[in-house]
Image (cartoon, helix red, strand yellow):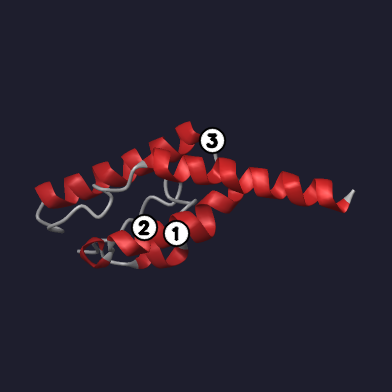
Amino acid sequence: VVKTIREDIRLFNHLTESLRNKDLVEITESDIRRWLVKEYLPNEPREEALKKHLQLLRQIFDYGIHRKICFDNPVKFIIASDYANNVIDLLSCRQTALIGCL
C-alpha cells in the first residue's frame, strides 16, 4: 500500500513534488517549514489560505496516526500567523525596493 499524499493531486498541487512523493512517516517538520519558506510564501498567499493548507496537512497526519501509517504530526507546532507576518514583511521589502528603483 502506497502511503503518500500523491494520490489526490487536485488537493495537493501546491505541494512540492518531494513532499508528495515521500511516505508520510518520512515527512518532518523541517520539510514542511522548508516548503513554506521556499515555495509557498513567495507566492504571497492570504493568511486564510495558509491556515487552510496547514489545517489540511494537520488532518492528513492525524488520519495517518489514526490508521497507524505514521506516528507523529509534523505540522502540529507550525503556526500560520508566524508565517503570515513574514509575508507582510516580505511585501514591505518588495515595496521598498520598488520605491528605490523609481
Q: Amino acid at mark 1?
A: Trp
Q: Residue at x 36, y 63 (%)?
A: 31
Disc 3 marks which amino acid?
Answer: Arg
Q: Against 38, is 78 above or below?
A: above
Residue 92 x, y percent position in the rendering: 66, 43
Q: Are marks 2 and 1 in contact (CB under 8 Å)?
A: yes
Residue identifier under label 3? 46
Determine whether the residue tagged by mark 3 lies in a helix, strand or loop: loop
Q: Earlier in the sequence, mark 3 or mark 2?
A: 2
Query: Which of the two discs, 1 and 3, labels the residue nearer the N terminus?
Result: 1
**Callout 1 secondary element:** helix
Compared across the picture, whether 75 is left or right of 100 comes to left
Q: Position of residue 85 (x, y in %)?
A: 49, 41
Residue type at the position of mark 2: Ile
Residue 23 coordinates in the image, percent (x, y): 26, 66
Separation of disc 2 and disc 1 at Cα?
5 Å
Q: Which residue is mark 2?
A: 32
Left/right placement of residue 91 relative to residue 85 reads right
